[in-house]
Amino acid sequence: MRLPSILLLTLLCLPLQAASLRLVTGDDYAPFTGQDLPGGGMLTQVVEAALQAQSRPYNMHWRPWNRGYLKTLQGEFDATFPYIKTPQREQVYLYSAPLFIAEQHIFSRADDPIEIDDPASLQGRRLCYPLGWAPPKVLQDMLDQGLLTRHSPTGLKECVRLLLLGRDDFFISDRRLGDAALRLAAVDTSRLRRSERAISNSTLHLIVPRSHPYGPQLIETFDHGLRALQDSGRYQRLIDEYLQSMDTASAEPPQ
């Protein structure tokens, strides 16, 4: 006996709807994600709100970035975030609609400023970029050609300290992320400088392994929730309120 198509689709989706989605993200990525940040970070709040808009149950887990990425590929988690698109990553992961558009800037020492206007000036420099993060293409090409060396600590706060120690020359980060790292590292921010121009713009996404049996459905469910947030205006309010709270906190004198 053939089942009606609607009933068949319902039966196929039951396992997807019944189980809680296993999410994993990483720490030390302020303002986007971080266990010590309000609500786990700005994009953690966006992801949770998008799933709640679809009445989709979930459990949030925290792991070191590289471990969470690999464990998601291995099936221990259903999805991880936030990640930019790279050709290598797209071979094994499906991407959600953009969670956020990030402007990537160069952060260097104030006494040795670096701008992107002259890429040749980067040759021989030492890039600090945390483990598991994918550099912009222009820098990845230079790394592949041996024109740059890369040091990969566990987080951006370590990059701030390594620059001030003179062990690395620059790091790349979204403007808000880099500014937050300077504050969290509790250093004299006047000793570091952010480039005037962005080196690139990139979008951040939730990603699901292509090997996941319900991967396309998970992405579709999440994107519907994210679109509902955006259409209602709640997405922009969440972003604006979070960034405003960060600006207010950074303006307060140290205790």
Image: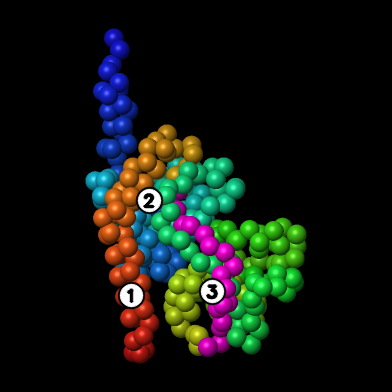
Quarter of the image that includes the N terminus: top left
Mark whose residue sits in front, 3 or 1: 1
Residue at position x 56%, y 70% in the image: 198
Say if 205 sits above or below 197 in the image.
Answer: above
Could you tell me if residue 162 is visible in this image? no
Residue 89 lies left or right of residue 235; in this view the side is right
The residue lying furthest to the top in this view is 1
Tell me the residue that label 1 is attached to. Answer: 244
Q: Quadrant of the C terminus?
A: bottom left
Q: CA distance from mark 3 to mark 1?
A: 25 Å
Question: In this picture, is 138 found above or below 157?
Answer: above
Q: Which mark is residue 23?
A: 2
In the image, residue 8 sits, relative to residue 196, either above or below, namely above
Give residue 115's position: percent from left, percent from top: 64, 76
Q: Position of residue 4 (x, y in %)?
A: 27, 18
Which amino acid type is shown beneath numbered disc 3? Glu
**Where is mark 3, residue-wise?**
158
Task: Classify 25 as above or below 242.
Answer: above
**Residue at disc 1, secondary structure:** helix
Magenta stretch, residue numbers: 190-207
Q: Position of residue 247 (x, y in %)?
A: 36, 79
Tell me the quarter of the picture where residue 153 sits. Answer: bottom right
Label 3 with label 2: CB-CB less than 8 Å: no
- Is residue 242 toward the left or the right of residue 147 in the image? left
